[in-house]
Image: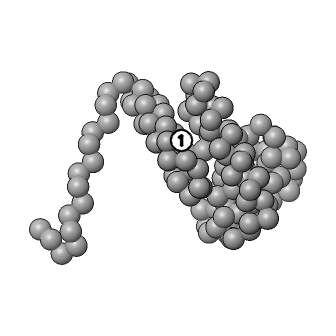
Amino acid sequence: AVHLGEAARLAPGNPDMHRNLAAAHAKGGRHGAAAAAYDQVLELDPADDASRSKRAYCRQQICDWSHWDRDILEMTSLIQHQLAKGEVPAPTPFDTLSLPIPGRLLKQVAQRKAAQIAQEEGGRPLPPRSPRRALGGT
């Protein structure tokens, strides 16, 4: 994240640099720093819905509830709008599971994402997952 921070400092107007820095912070568990970097991304690229979703998730991880109502409203509205347009919603199925949005929307996001992945795999259905074995089982 140090090198990405330097890159973001050297290219302050480049949202990709801030997006990469935010992702590195989030992956490293530094959700407060990630949320701040996502703020910078959204200042530079207000239409970046994926970053908006990831910022909401990071805020939740650090218990920053000051934007909670707005974040939930934005995510719900965004998901409904993108589903209505036939798009794969920007928030990932994992990100949506962390937000209190209606179950029907969660299911639609997951279904749309699964269809996208299947199409990227050449239209082949995804193989079923093997059930996990019980701990200590054979």
Q: Is residue 126 left or right of residue 97?
A: left
Which residue sits at x=44%, y=36%? 111
In the shown orientation, is residue 58 left or right of residue 15?
A: left
Q: Residue furthest left?
A: 138
* Image quadrant containing the C terminus: bottom left
Which residue is at a point 81% across and 40% down the rendered structure image? 46
Residue where numbered disc 1 is placed: 105
Q: Is residue 136 above or below residue 86?
A: below
Looking at the image, which residue is at 31% across and 31% down? Answer: 125
Q: Position of residue 56 (x, y in %)?
A: 69, 56
Does residue 1 appear anywhere in the picture? no
Q: How far from the left and from the top, in percent, is residue 88?
A: 56, 33
User: In which quadrant of the rendered view does residue 64 lie?
Assistant: bottom right
**Considering depth in this image, is 138 or 52 the residue closer to the camera?**
52
Q: Can you name the residue that lies furthest to the bottom here?
A: 136
Say left or right for 75 vs 104. Answer: right
Q: Secondary structure at mark 1?
A: helix
Q: How is the image coloured?
A: one colour
Residue located 49% across and 42% down the image? 104
Crowding near pointer 1: few (<14 within 10 Å), some, many (20+)?
A: some
The residue closer to the viewer here, 103 or 27, is: 103
Q: Position of residue 11 (x, y in %)?
A: 85, 48
User: What's under tag 1, amino acid-wise?
Assistant: Leu
Q: Nearer the viewer, residue 54 or 76?
A: 76
